[in-house]
Amino acid sequence: MYELFELERCPYCQKVMSFMDSRDIKYKKHDITDHAEEETLIRLGGKRQVPFLYNKDSGLKMYESADIIEYLSNL
């Protein structure tokens, strides 16, 4: 399952979530206003930047909304 680290007010995060919802792509949201979620984001990706898409099963780690949407478009 995909995990998306995000901030609700971030327009780039909104763009990715809207795309995933429109394609019925299941994902778990992690709001990084929660300190524990923010620490997990930094541990996984190395920096505090959203959106960040993660898939534990495949090892996918991806920043940048355009790159995330392009990747998901090709599934």
Image (cartoon, rainbow, N blue to C red):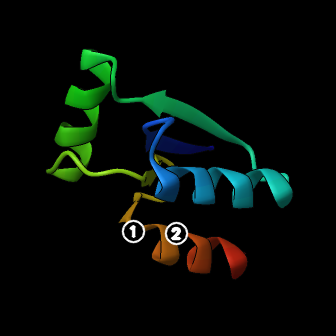
| Residue occupying image coordinates x 39% and y 53% | 52
What amino acid type is highlighted by mark number 2?
Ile
Residue for badge 1: 64
Quadrant into which the N terminus falls: top right
Q: Position of residue 70 (x, y in %)?
A: 59, 80
Residue 37, located in which quarter of the rendered image? top left
Residue 45, given in percent of the width and then of the height, sits at 23, 51
Q: Residue at x 50, y 54 (%)?
A: 11
For residue 27, side relative to residue 46 (left or right): right
Disc marking residue 68: 2
- Depth check, front residue: 56 or 43: 43
Q: Is residue 9 above or below residue 15?
A: above
Residue 42 has which mark? none
Q: Position of residue 50 (x, y in %)?
A: 35, 50
Question: Pointer 1: residues within 10 angstroms few (<14), some, or many (20+)?
Answer: some
In the image, is residue 44 above or below residue 70? above
Density class for disc 2 (Cα within 10 Å; few <14, some 14-19, many ≥20) is some
Q: What residue is rendered at 18% in x and 38% in y?
A: 43
Nearest the camera: 58 or 53?
Answer: 53
Q: Quadrant of residue 36?
A: top left
Residue at 42%, 53% (x, y): give it: 51
Count of labels shown?
2
Q: Nearer the viewer, residue 11 or 59?
A: 11
Marks 2,1: beta carbons within 8 A:
yes
Cα separation between marks 2 and 1: 6 Å
Mark 1 element type: loop
Q: Secondary structure at mark 2?
A: helix
Given the image, on which type of amino acid does mark 1 rest?
Glu
Task: Pick the quarter of the image with the C terminus.
Answer: bottom right
Q: Position of residue 69 (x, y in %)?
A: 60, 72
Left or right of 49, for residue 52: right
* Position of residue 40 in the picture relative to residue 9 (left or right): left
